Amino acid sequence: MKKVQLGSSSLQVSRVCLGSMTWGVQNNQADASKQLDYALAQGINFVDTAEMYAIPPKEETYGATESIIGNWLADNPAKRQDIVLASKIAGPGLSYIRDGGPITGASVIEAVEGSLRRLKTDYLDLYQLHWPNRNSPHFANHWPGVLDFEVVDSAAQTENMLDILNGLAHCVKAGKIRYCGLSDDTPWGISQYLRLSEKYDLPKIVSIQNEFSLLHTKDWPYLIEQCVHEDIAYLPWSPLACGALSGKYLGGARPAGTRWTLMQRNGLFRDTPMSGKAIAAYVDLAKSHGISPVQLALGWVNQVSGVTSTIIGATSTTQLKEDINAFSQPLSAQIINDINSLLKQYPSPF
């Protein structure tokens, strides 16, 4: 498994990152431990989690995923040095997490302590802000007119970002986190954090993880261009659009135990008639080239210039094996050309 540098950090991470958000709802401890063992055996050293997991989020499963990883680390203490462990502080809106309040410097310090306790480790390699305090154009909010940026108090938001950076700096100085990252943010958010960190000599953002797939390419080219030139690792999450690009939900199918059979916090916003047409076209394209839809979708994300490490997730070891194998063989130039033709037909299907 190829390793690459995580932005401007000193960390070397695998081109595939093991996501964990199903652990605690769709997967139990035994499932998760088996996935971790298998992933490490394949050369994956990058593991991503979050305090709000498992997904879909609810109070009774808050922190469950971190606890599952912590149990695995307790059983395998020597493996802590072999993994780059990333977690995230939840943004505002969940009443059972700090009363639904915004991220602040103080809440960063509090949340880091909670994550370290559940993960049974002394430090996190990467600590990320799960989503910004302001409304951002993610989770199908990217269409014109959905958000009104003119009502945002940019000065207040910037002051809040400075407070957050100071909280992160406190944790870095204490040796509890090594590097800092963003998630579900925008070029403006990246720019403000970079400016503030340089002005006040605070930790620099080294990564951002955003949704990115054949169904959701809005970060190309502008945000990804910024990441490349600012030396910020770009980490796509949901590269299979929550499994939809495997084709398993086509025709309204809902296989037992799958993600779309569960209540979702933001609803099934990816499930649109146009998405169905796009997915069917990609499935047919994969079949015509003798590869699986999963190989097509993950292989495409992997070859996008600027992508550092792709975050995958699975509810079974069989799925995990298929996902990892999808990165072993680059897609041909002909397949890429055929995909580009479909992207022009379905540029933003949800």
Image (cartoon, rainbow, N blue to C red):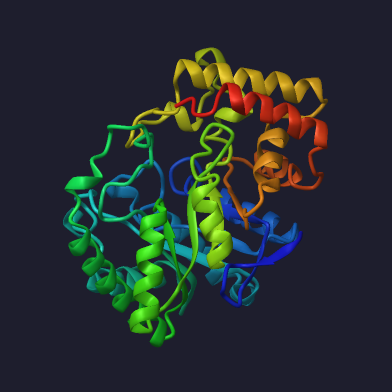
At horizontal 35% and vertical 53% (from top left) the residue drawn is 131
Tell me: 141 left or right of 315: left
Of the pair 54 and 264, the residue shown nearer to us: 264
Q: Quadrant of the N terminus?
A: bottom right
At horizontal 33% and vertical 74% (from top left) the residue drawn is 165
Q: Hey, which quadrant is residue 105 in on the image? A: bottom left
Of the pair 168 and 227, the residue shown nearer to us: 227
At horizontal 45% and vertical 23% (from top left) the residue drawn is 271
Tell me: 144 left or right of 72: left
Of the pair 328 and 278, the residue shown nearer to us: 278
Tell me: 272 left or right of 80: left
Coordinates of residue 341 in the picture (x, y in percent): 68, 25
Q: Hey, which quadrant is residue 161 in on the image? A: bottom left
Q: Is the residue 65 above or below the residue 118 in the image?
A: above
Coordinates of residue 84 in the picture (x, y in percent): 58, 69
At horizontal 35% and vertical 30% (from top left) the residue drawn is 267
Q: Quadrant of the C terminus?
A: top left
Coordinates of residue 149 in the picture (x, y in percent): 25, 45
Coordinates of residue 293 in the picture (x, y in percent): 69, 29
